[in-house]
Each structure stands twice: as structure tokens, then as C-alpha cells.
Image (cartoon, rainbow, N blue to C red):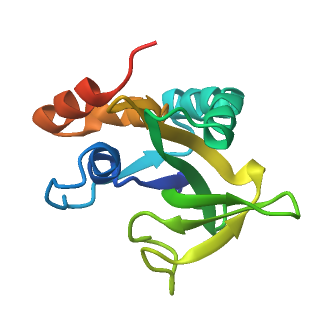
């Protein structure tokens, strides 16, 4: 009998540490939360589509942040072979003259050999799968975080949900 392989995308999402580090740098470091999501996951695909549609909100704040807006981060997909990819939060985002972007890995890549947290990499807008920033201590954006909440321990999910700005 033939074995069917379902492609997966690795959402290496240091969700808790990323979210809390922007608003409360004095909190202790948290363990990385890595959640595997199937590439065919309809809820995650919809979250990525919505994040891409609302990317102008991110860029408006990035280019002219209010004093209460900090910690601008992008989640970027990096290919890992075949149709698979690792989606990972990036910090220290910069626009490049060639129309691309550069940023540093905000957490340790799992499936990108030779890459480490803090490494500077370049990417294109088509690689962006989500965005977020902090406003008055709340997470704005973070669309791909929402589908992952159901996979997290309840206490962590509730704490993160409380940190998210409601529209």
C-alpha cells in the first residue's frame, strides 16, 4: 500500500516569548513553542491571507510609529525542501533599496541548517506570512497566532489571548 505524505509547514513560532518580549522585557525567557501545521490547514491559510491583506497597516505603523507602537515584527516563510517551509518571526525589520527586506531571526530556526537566532537574512514581500507590533502593551496583528491558540496549553493560550488587541 502506498504511503501518502501530507506536506506540512513548520510554524516555528516563539509566540509567547515574542509577544511578551515587546511589552515586558523584564520577564524571564520562555521556552520556544513550535507547532506543526499542515499546509492544507484552511484556518491557517485564511489567517495568512488576512495578514497579507492587512500588511499596509503594519507598514503605516512601521514608517510612522506612534509613541505607543513598538516591536514591529514580521513572520516570514523560508523554504525547507519540496513544498515545505518554516514560518518564523523576524525582528529588526529593515526595508532595502532593492525593494526587499532584511531582518533577524527572533527565535531559533528548526529546519534551516546553519541558521541561528539573531542571524540577519533577506527576503521578499511574497515571503511574508504575518505581522505584528505592540500598541499600548497589546499585540496588533498576529493573525497566524489565533489558529495556534487551540494547540497551546490553556493557561498559555489564555494569557496570550489577553495580550491581543481586539478590533
Q: Where residue 140 sits: x, y (%)?
A: 46, 29
Picture layout, residue 103 above or below residue 36: below
Q: Residue lying furthest top in this view?
A: 167
Observer-nearest of 155 and 27? 27
In this rendering, the count of numbered labels is: 0
Picture layout, residue 62 above or below residue 146: below
Q: Is residue 1 visible?
A: no
Observer-nearest of 161 and 21? 21
- Which residue is located at x 23 percent, y 47 percent? 24
Q: Where residue 133 sits: x, y (%)?
A: 48, 39
Picture layout, residue 15 above or below residue 111: above
Q: Where residue 13 sits: x, y (%)?
A: 39, 52
Q: Residue lying furthest right in this view?
A: 98
- Which residue is located at x 50 percent, y 81 percent? 115
Observer-nearest of 73 and 108? 73
Q: Is residue 16 left or right of residue 13?
A: left
Q: Where residue 136 sits: x, y (%)?
A: 36, 28
- Which residue is located at x 88 percent, y 64 percent? 98
Q: Is residue 20 visible?
A: yes
Q: Quadrant of residue 165?
A: top left
Q: Residue lying furthest front in this view?
A: 67
Amino acid at each position: 500500500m502506498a504511503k501518502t505524505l501530507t506536506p506540512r509547514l513548520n510554524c516555528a513560532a516563539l509566540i509567547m516569548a515574542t509577544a511578551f518580549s515587546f511589552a515586558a522585557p523584564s520577564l524571564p525567557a520562555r521556552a520556544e513553542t513550535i507547532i506543526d501545521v499542515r499546509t492544507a490547514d484552511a484556518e491557517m491559510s485564511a489567517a495568512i491571507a488576512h495578514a497579507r491583506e492587512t500588511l499596509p497597516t503594519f507598514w503605516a505603523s512601521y514608517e510612522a510609529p506612534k509613541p505607543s507602537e513598538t516591536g514591529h515584527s514580521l513572520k516570514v516563510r523560508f523554504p525547507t525542501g519540496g513544498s515545505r517551509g518554516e514560518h518564523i518571526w523576524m525582528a529588526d525589520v529593515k526595508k532595502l533599496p532593492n525593494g526587499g527586506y532584511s531582518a533577524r531571526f527572533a527565535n531559533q530556526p528548526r529546519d534551516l541548517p546553519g541558521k541561528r537566532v539573531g542571524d540577519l537574512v533577506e527576503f521578499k514581500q511574497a515571503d511574508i506570512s504575518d505581522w505584528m507590533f505592540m500598541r499600548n502593551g497589546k499585540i496588533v496583528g498576529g493573525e497566524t497566532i489565533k489558529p495556534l491558540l487551540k494547540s497551546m496549553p490553556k493557561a498559555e493560550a489564555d494569557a496570550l489571548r489577553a495580550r491581543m488587541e481586539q478590533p
